[in-house]
Amino acid sequence: MDKALQTMINNMPEKTGKSLEQWKTLLITKSFSKHSEAVNFLKKEHQVTHGFANTIVSLSKEETHAPTDLVTAQYKGKENLFPIYEQLLTVVKKFGDDVVITPKKTTVSIIRKKQFALIKPATKTRIDLGLKLKDVPTTERLENSGPFGAMCTHRVRISTSDGIDDQLIAWLQQAYLKAD
């Protein structure tokens, strides 16, 4: 842990009225769908400054919603799709060191400077891969974004590892390059 963060944690009781552990205990009792909702709650209801609120929420998430737990939950009952998910991650990680993989409750965001792909186990037999490919026409395989709405421009349905072919990898790489 870096010095500045440790200093902030050490000063938390004096500056906010509660220790980090007390804040974590409070946040566990609440249900926020977004990081910003939890930050705003701490700022408005408890008069915590933005910097402390952001730190408290971030550190609370690390413990209570570990990324592997989120991914494990997504694939519960859909374990047969997990190798496809892992193969997609292997592909995108090869694009560069700037690829960030961010698990969420129902999806995994793939981000460069902006999100360029989204992986979602849609059914027990299919993963939906959302792509941000502005100005690229849809095809029979490269469909409109469907359930992803504005988060992505296109969707590809993948039921087997064979679905991760050269064409799909090219679309992923194109989305990655556009996310710069």
Image (cartoon, rainbow, N blue to C red):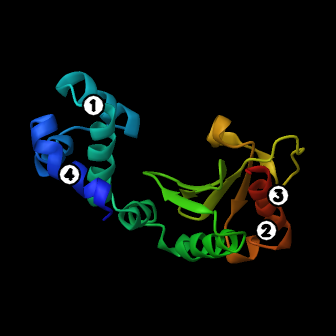
The vertical placement of 118 against 94, above or below, is above
Give the alpha-carbon distance from disc 3 to disc 4, as whole Å: 42 Å
Q: Answer with the quarter of the image where residue 73 lies.
A: bottom left
Give x and y (percent) for residue 59. Answer: 29, 53
Q: Answer with the quarter of the image where residue 12 lies.
A: top left
Q: In the displayed structure, does residue 173 sit left or right of residue 59? A: right
Q: In the displayed structure, does residue 95 sit left or right of residue 70? A: right
Of the two numbered discs 1 and 3 on the same chain, state the one appearing first in sequence. Answer: 1
Identify the residue at horizontal 33%, vertical 49% (top origin): 58
Give the alpha-carbon distance from disc 4 to disc 1, as whole Å: 13 Å
The residue beneath circle 1 is: 49
Give the alpha-carbon distance from disc 3 to disc 2, as whole Å: 9 Å
Of the two numbered discs 4 and 1 on the same chain, state the one appearing first in sequence. Answer: 4
Q: Nearer the viewer, mark 2 or mark 4?
A: 4
Amino acid on which disc 1 is placed: Thr
The residue beneath circle 4 is: 9
Give the alpha-carbon distance from disc 2 to disc 4, as whole Å: 43 Å
